Image: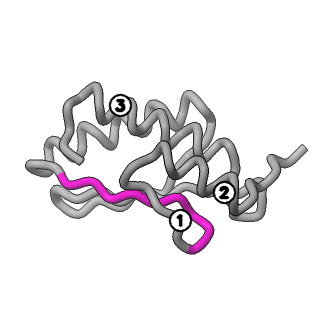
Amino acid sequence: MATEPLTDEAIQRALESLPGWSLHDNQLQREYKFADFKEAMGFIVQVGLHAEAQNHHPEMFNVYSTLRIALNTHDAGGQVTHKDVDLAKAIERSRQSASIPR
């Protein structure tokens, strides 16, 4: 059974608890800036581990010290679901525990 898309209202409520995240093109999106490439790559690995544990894999784009993450659920026709919100929250917890600047 496919995961159900969230309503616009549910997405907006979720974004209230995800500072820095926004909704664009049916995706939860966030950009991070790091001190250098090494720090960015370390965070990408952390995100990858969270994604694999949740069996939900984001789009990630890295250029030197910048990382852009986009989340939506392919099983829900490319819409935002609870899976995306859960992964965004895990990513934020990881960022906070690593003391990575916003």
Residue occupying the far left of the picture: 35
Picture quadrant where residue 12 is located: bottom right
Label 2, on which residue?
A: 80
Label 3, on which residue?
A: 94
Q: Position of residue 78 (x, y in %)?
A: 69, 64
Q: Residue at x 55, y 46 (%)?
A: 57
Left or right: 36 as drawn, with respect to 62? left
Q: Position of residue 88 (x, y in %)?
A: 49, 43
Q: Are marks 3 and 2 in contact (CB under 8 Å)?
A: no
How far apart are the two marked residues, 2 and 1, measured between alpha carbons? 9 Å
Q: Nearer the viewer, residue 4 or 16?
A: 16
Earlier residue among tags 3 and 1: 1
Q: Residue at x 69, y 62 (%)?
A: 8
Any mark on residue 23, and which? 1
Kind of residue at badge 1: Leu
Q: In the image, which residues are magenta?
A: 25-33
